[in-house]
């Protein structure tokens, strides 16, 4: 009886760990905690930088509720990659991090907007949430 109960407890624990791992790949979880999911359009709608939250209306980690607008812009529309200064990164669940940039030199405080590299010559814009 004791062995059977121990086996049942072990099975429940394994199932809980697997379920928690599965929840990490859900768009809701990625959007809530601000990390990217692997694959195309995996960036979350909200990221955190310099103590502030930033919002994008064009991405939502693959959830179906975000706008179906053009996802990203090329670096030429941002003044070229030379005009961008990397200030942070957005972590990706089991993947490479996405660099976060500001246009021009890096500011001392929190910038009003940032761009995140989503792929080769593909940048997604984010704007600061809340007031200054």
Image (cartoon, grey):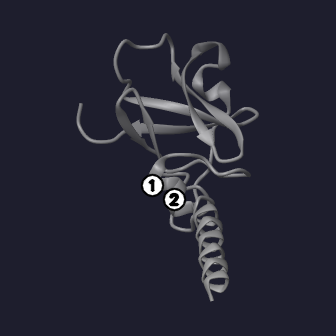
Residue depicted at x 48% and y 30%: 114
Q: Is residue 132 left or right of residue 59?
A: left
Which is nearer the eye, 51 or 109?
51
Q: Residue at x 51, y 67 (%)?
A: 65
User: Looking at the picture, does residue 85 appear above or below residue 41?
Assistant: above
**Separation of marks 2 and 1 at Cα, in angstroms:** 5 Å
Horizontal placement of 22 versus 49: left or right? right
Image quadrant where one finds the N terminus? bottom right
Q: Which residue is mark 1?
A: 32
Q: Nearer the viewer, residue 88 or 101?
A: 88
Q: Is residue 6 left or right of residue 51?
A: right
Residue 116, compared with residue 92, is above or below; it is: above
Q: Position of residue 32 (x, y in %)?
A: 45, 54
Secondary structure, mark 2, is: helix
| Quarter assignment of residue 81 | top right
Relative to 77, residue 67 above or below: below
Q: Residue at x 49, y 54 (%)?
A: 31
In which quadrant of the rendered view does residue 128 lie? top left
Residue 68: where, in percent of width, then height? 58, 60
Say what secondary structure mark 1 lies in: helix
Which residue of the protein is positioned furthest toward the front in this rendering?
2
Mark 2 = which residue?
Answer: 29
Q: Quadrant of the C terminus?
A: top left
Image location of residue 70, percent across then percent down: 62, 50
Q: Residues within 10 Å of mark 1 (few under 14, many from 20)?
A: few
- Quadrant assignment, res 98: top right
50 relative position to 96: left or right:
left
Q: Are marks 2 and 1 in contact (CB under 8 Å)?
A: yes
């Amino acid at each position: 009886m004791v062995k059977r109960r121990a086996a049942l407890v072990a099975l429940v624990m394994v199932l809980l760990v697997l379920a928690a791992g599965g929840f990490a790949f859900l768009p809701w979880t990625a959007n809530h905690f601000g990390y990217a999911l692997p694959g195309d359009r995996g960036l979350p709608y909200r990221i955190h930088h310099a103590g502030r939250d930033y919002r994008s209306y064009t991405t939502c980690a693959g959830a179906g509720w975000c706008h179906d607008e053009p996802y990203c812009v090329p670096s030429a529309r941002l003044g070229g990659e030379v005009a961008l200064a990397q200030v942070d990164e957005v972590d990706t669940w089991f993947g490479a991090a996405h660099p976060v940039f500001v246009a021009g030199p890096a500011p001392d405080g929190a910038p009003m907007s940032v761009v995140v590299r989503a792929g080769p010559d593909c940048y997604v814009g984010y704007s600061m949430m809340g007031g200054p």
